Image (cartoon, helix red, strand yellow):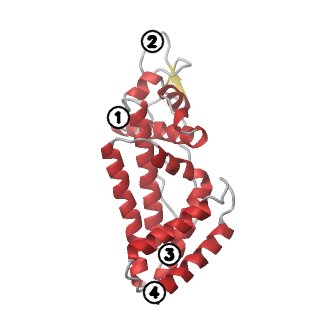
Amino acid sequence: MRPLNQSRHCASLHFTSSIRQPYATLTNHSSPWLCQDGQVPRILAPTLAENRDQRRSALLTAGHELVTTGGPRALTMAAVAARAGLSRPAAYEYFGSTEDLLAAVLLEEMRQWSGDVVDCLAAESTPEQKISRYVDVSLGLIADGRHAIIAVMSETSLPKPVREQINAMHATLAAPLTQAVAALGISDTDQAVRLIQGVVEAAARRLAPGSDPQSEVKASSAFVLAGLKALANT
């Protein structure tokens, strides 16, 4: 989960953890904000609202890390609070249950994934470049290990409102790709987009987390563009 103020860029899309700040020690007091070592995070932000945003972001970052490394079962309120440097009661100030936290982690991941892809495609000029960039960015994000989070989305039973938000983000993600496909003169854009996504998913299964995706990107892009050219001529 990237920090709230970290900008996206297409050259290097990597997961960045929040930097945890030192804590101020409280003595002989009981507080829901106390960490397990008897300490409490300092309020370093200018306002209470900003401080709450920072703590929520830290919890989301911790949740992302736990799900990525251990799957959804690794996500407990106690584990995420400890990883974020907060007490368990403090974590409940932001999320009412583990299910709420998991849903928030998935939504934030999808927002970032969608934003990364849309921004990178917007930087390209021709339809072919946009389509190649879609393949490139998608496989790059998967190679970073974020496929684990995306897999959770398909495997986890989510509340209907959360699922609807994720579906809406998928539509936003597909829109620039659909426009690029249409610009090539392909009439059945839905079919073409699904085929592109199928190629990306097939290539993704060949990647190991942390591996260099460039050989798969090159082959997949060439395959996709050749296939789209054939479709445009039918």
Provide residue 127's location: percent of width, then percent of height: 46, 81
Dot 1 falls on a residue whose secondary structure is: helix
Single out the residue that lies furthest toward the bottom.
233
**What is the C-alpha distance between the residues marked 3 and 4?**
14 Å
Could you say which disc has been placed on residue 232 in the image? Answer: 4
Q: Position of residue 171 (x, y in %)?
A: 36, 62
Q: Report, in whole angstroms, how far the alpha carbon at label 1 lies from the one at label 2.
A: 21 Å
User: Mark 3 touching mark 1, by CB under 8 A?
Assistant: no
Dot 4 lies on which element? helix
Amino acid of disc 3: Ile
50 sits left or right of 196 in the view: left
Name the residue carrying label 3: 131
Pointer 1 residue: 48
Identify the secondary structure beneath mark 2: loop
Q: Is residue 178 above or below residue 88?
A: below
Q: Nearer the viewer, mark 4 or mark 2?
A: 4
| Amino acid type, residue under disc 4 in the picture | Ala
Which residue is at a point 50% across and 25% down the rendered structure image?
A: 78
In the rendered view, does 135 fall on the left or right side of 97?
A: right
